[in-house]
Image (cartoon, rainbow, N blue to C red):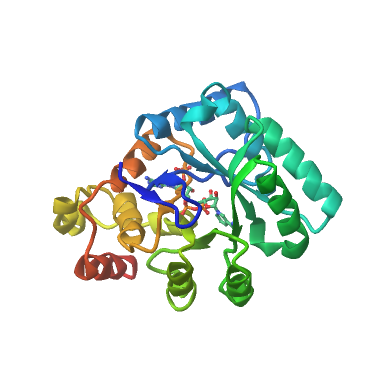
Amino acid sequence: METRTLGQTGLQVPVVGMGTWQTFDVRGAAAEQNARAVVDAALNAGAHFFDSSPMYGEAERVLGKAIVDRRDQVLLATKVWTPSAQEGRAQVARALQFFGNRIDLYQLHNLVAWQEQLALLEALRDAGQVRAIGATHYSPSAFGELKRVMQTRRITAIQIPYNPLERDVAREILPLAAELNLGVVVMRPLGGGNLMRQPPTSAALAPLAPFGVTTWAQALLKWGLSDPRCHVAIPATSKPARMQENAHAGDPPWFGPEERAYVARLCIR
Ligand SMILES: NC(=O)c1ccc[n+]([C@@H]2O[C@H](COP(=O)([O-])OP(=O)(O)OC[C@H]3O[C@@H](n4cnc5c(N)ncnc54)[C@H](OP(=O)(O)O)[C@@H]3O)[C@@H](O)[C@H]2O)c1
């Protein structure tokens, strides 16, 4: 698995990590055991970067339980997501408890009350409990505001959607991130699963074999990771075998413009 420096955060991240939205919002012994098996598959494949949020129901708790005995082997990203200062502090207290009293990347989820919550995260960073601060948004309608937050230079990473059918960030956000040397975490690399509904045939994927790509998920992950402005993609899955499959997209060689255009064409068959 290739690693990259997550911009100014200085964190050395594997290019494939894992998200936890929906997939880790589970309860009960069997489901939590399955979540642990997904984390096992990620760690075995070198994909040791995990992203969560208090917005994802049980996900922070379930992820925390799955890594409790191996906290030093993982990088943990989570988020604060509330307009309330009091609830923000409560979310932080819960996350620190779930994740061994330190968070590697703490993000402003959807920029909710970002001025207020940024001050909270800065205090935690100054106290040594948070290594880096980022901001996330999924919607192009918020990218103007995201740019303003980036320009404050008070954050060192962003998390944005990027796949062949969602490329709004290519216009202004990725160029600005590169200019400011911000870390870039890619959410929705598989279009939230929508791009997986009708995968191309194996014959259509054959031209990508020289790039180590044997599945459609790997083609989509490699499409994003072949943009050098992106540092880590965080596909979510509830299946250990798929985590292993996704991690295989994290090795070079990377696509050039022709292969990226080819994958984009396969999306709009
Ligand atoms: N900050 C924000 O606003 C925001 C918004 C969205 C997402 N995120 C973060 O980004 C992460 C990723 O985004 P996402 O979860 O929306 O979407 P995604 O990773 O693009 O897609 C996830 C879906 O793809 C399926 N999948 C995963 N690997 C697969 C494979 N190899 N073959 C076939 N299907 C596969 C999963 O189903 P199975 O479980 O059945 O494998 C799941 O339904 C989230 O989990 C979250 O951490 C952040």
Q: Is residue 254 left or right of residue 149?
A: left
Which quadrant holds residue 223? bottom left
Q: Position of residue 2 (x, y in %)?
A: 30, 45
The residue sitting at 64% across, 74% down in the picture is: 145
Which quadrant is the C terminus positioned in? bottom left
Q: Position of residue 97 (x, y in %)?
A: 70, 31
What's the residue at 41%, 69% (across, down)?
165
Locate residue 116: give its quadrant.
bottom right
Where is 150 relative to 234, above or below? below
Q: Nearer the viewer, residue 135 or 16?
A: 135
Q: Residue at x 46, y 46 (%)?
A: 11
Where 57 falls versus 28 (above or below)? Answer: below
The answer to which image quadrant residue 147 occupies is: bottom right
| Residue furthest front in the image | 126
Q: Is residue 4 left or right of residue 235?
A: left
What residue is rendered at 44% in x and 27% in y?
40
Residue 211 seen from this side: yes
Which residue is more in the foreground, 66 or 193? 66
Q: Position of residue 222 (x, y in %)?
A: 30, 55
Quadrant location, the N terminus: top left
Q: Nearer the viewer, residue 92 or 61?
A: 92
Q: Residue furthest right?
A: 86
Q: How many marks?
A: 0
Residue 266 higher or lower than 41, as above or below: below
Q: Foreground: 15 or 140?
A: 15
